[in-house]
């Protein structure tokens, strides 16, 4: 189990760095391309749309080729997508968001497939949470080193370094493929109808349906935070390096919190209640984000965004382990892909709404408040599901 956890941790970290750099380096990219800040939300919405399609169709490919092989494919796609952004200007970013992330979307379902098979059931939530700390770890690395490297390499050179790391790790995973990919089914059929059956499959089961709606709200708010945090701080008067450092510090909070919530939800408190608490926590802190002004101290801003990081950036292990637990045997990758596809719907819609409200109002407050609403609704729904305690453990 340890080898599987480490391998998927590396895979997820590299992918996370590649995905966050456009947001971290956005102030530099916007100046060079003479773009409106609202386009950041559009870019991340396109990423989410491509990821949605990729995750819906990933299940069959994981079963046919194996989780490690598809993890390698995800890393190569991430690096290739970064290269498209570097060379193609605005059009390159659109192609990067669609092509690179559509294929790279297989990363998390592949990780779930592998861990669902290798993790001991009692420790599954904990193992999933540890692996998912790779996401904030990657964001932390990208947020702290990205602005620093850009001072000497420029934003293009910085992203090129990230692409190279993805390619190297993809090669390293090859040494583990024979040991971990023990269950590929080369004859497994892949059909276009898999997209529909993946969605209908998770909606048909109440527990998976509740998890899908939670993933929609949680991932959507996470996408807004990732996309706009640095740009929001620069609008408040922070320079890019300081904003990137604060971003990394805040995101670092999610690393222990992902493990903490997985540990609590796995051993002490029903995962349903853990997720409900996270939903309300992220909703309140999101509304407070919109109240920031230049008069707020860095400590106060850090405290509010720290709570948002501890909730909106920290739910993954609980949701994914519950999704895998309710999946038919050998189909954890497909089921988690279906649940995560709803998360990508949220990651598409909420940044789009945020971008629209930013353009219309000229400020950030309305966007933060509106994007908190789905989390409130999910929290209420989870608290009402007392009869569904099969989600408890």
Image (tube, rainbow, N blue to C red):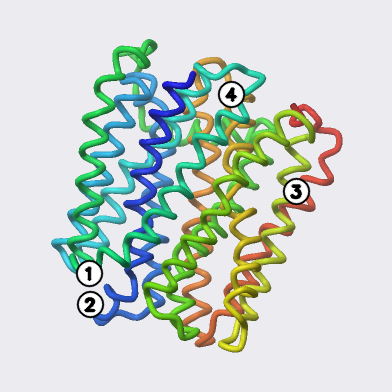
Residue pointed to by mark 1: 90
Whether the residues at callouts 1 and 2 have beta carbons within 8 Å, the answer is yes
Q: Earlier in the sequence, mark 4 or mark 2?
A: 2
Q: Is residue 41 shown above or below 263?
A: below
Q: Which residue is at the front of the view, 267 or 80?
A: 267
Could you tell me residue 9's position as x and y percent? 42, 35
Indicate which label's residue lies in the foreground, 4 or 2. Answer: 2
Q: Do the residues bearing badges 4 and 1 touch, measured as CB atoms within 8 Å?
A: no
Q: Which residue is mark 4?
A: 327
Question: Alpha carbon of mark 1 to alpha carbon of mark 2: how far?
Answer: 7 Å
Whichever of callouts 4 and 1 sits on the residue coming sooner in the sequence is 1
Give the distance between the C-alpha atoms of the residues marked 2 and 3, in whole angstroms.
Answer: 41 Å
Image coordinates for residue 273, horizontal then vertical, percent: 78, 42
| First in sequence: mark 1 vs mark 3 | 1
In depth, the one of 189 and 279 nearer the eye is 279
Mark 3, residue position = 276
SS label for mark 1: helix
Q: Mark 1 or mark 2, which has the lower sequence index?
A: 2
Q: Quadrant of the C terminus?
A: top right
Q: Position of residue 291 (x, y in %)?
A: 65, 80
Q: What secondary structure is found at the residue carrying circle 2?
A: helix
User: Which residue appears at 19% of the width and 64% of the height?
Assistant: 156
Q: Is residue 76 left or right of residue 87?
A: right
Alpha carbon separation for disc pair 3 and 4: 22 Å
Q: CA distance from mark 4 to mark 2?
A: 45 Å
Q: What residue is rendered at 39% in x and 53% in y?
A: 141
The residue sitting at 54% across, 57% down in the picture is 222
Can you tell which of label 1 and label 2 is closer to the viewer? 2
């Amino acid at each position: 189990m340890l080898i599987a956890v480490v391998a998927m941790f590396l895979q997820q970290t590299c992918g996370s760095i590649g995905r966050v750099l456009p947001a971290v380096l956005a102030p530099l990219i916007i100046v060079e391309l003479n773009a409106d800040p609202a386009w950041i939300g559009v870019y991340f919405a396109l990423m989410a749309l491509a990821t949605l399609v990729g995750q819906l169709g990933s299940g069959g490919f994981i079963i046919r080729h194996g989780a490690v092989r598809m993890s390698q494919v995800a890393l190569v796609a991430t690096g290739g997508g970064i290269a498209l952004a570097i060379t193609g200007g605005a059009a390159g970013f659109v192609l990067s968001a669609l092509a690179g992330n559509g294929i790279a979307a297989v990363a998390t379902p592949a990780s779930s497939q592998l861990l669902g098979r290798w993790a001991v059931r009692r420790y599954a939530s904990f193992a999933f949470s540890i692996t998912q700390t790779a996401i904030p770890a990657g964001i932390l690395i990208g947020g702290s080193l990205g602005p620093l490297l850009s001072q000497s390499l420029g934003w293009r050179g910085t992203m090129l370094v990230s692409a190279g790391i993805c390619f190297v790790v993809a090669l390293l995973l090859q040494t583990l493929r024979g040991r971990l990919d023990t269950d590929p089914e080369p004859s497994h059929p892949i059909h276009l109808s898999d997209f529909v059956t993946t969605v209908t499959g998770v909606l048909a089961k109440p527990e998976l349906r509740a998890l899908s709606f939670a993933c929609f709200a949680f991932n959507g708010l996470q996408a807004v935070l990732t996309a706009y945090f640095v740009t929001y701080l620069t609008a408040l008067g922070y320079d890019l390096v300081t904003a990137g450092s604060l971003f990394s510090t805040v995101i670092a909070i999610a690393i222990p919190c992902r493990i903490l919530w997985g540990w609590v939800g796995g051993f002490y408190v029903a995962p349903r209640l853990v997720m409900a608490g996270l939903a309300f926590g992220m909703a309140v802190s999101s509304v407070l984000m919109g109240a920031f002004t230049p008069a707020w101290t860095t400590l106060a801003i850090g405290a509010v965004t720290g709570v948002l990081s501890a909730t909106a950036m920290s739910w993954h292990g609980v949701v994914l382990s519950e999704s895998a637990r309710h999946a038919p045997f050998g189909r954890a990758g497909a089921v988690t892909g279906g649940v995560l596809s709803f998360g990508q719907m949220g990651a598409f819609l909420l940044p789009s709404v945020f971008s629209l409200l930013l353009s219309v109002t000229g400020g950030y407050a309305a966007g933060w408040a509106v994007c908190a609403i789905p989390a409130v609704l999910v929290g209420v729904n989870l608290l009402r599901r007392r009869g569904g305690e099969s989600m408890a453990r």
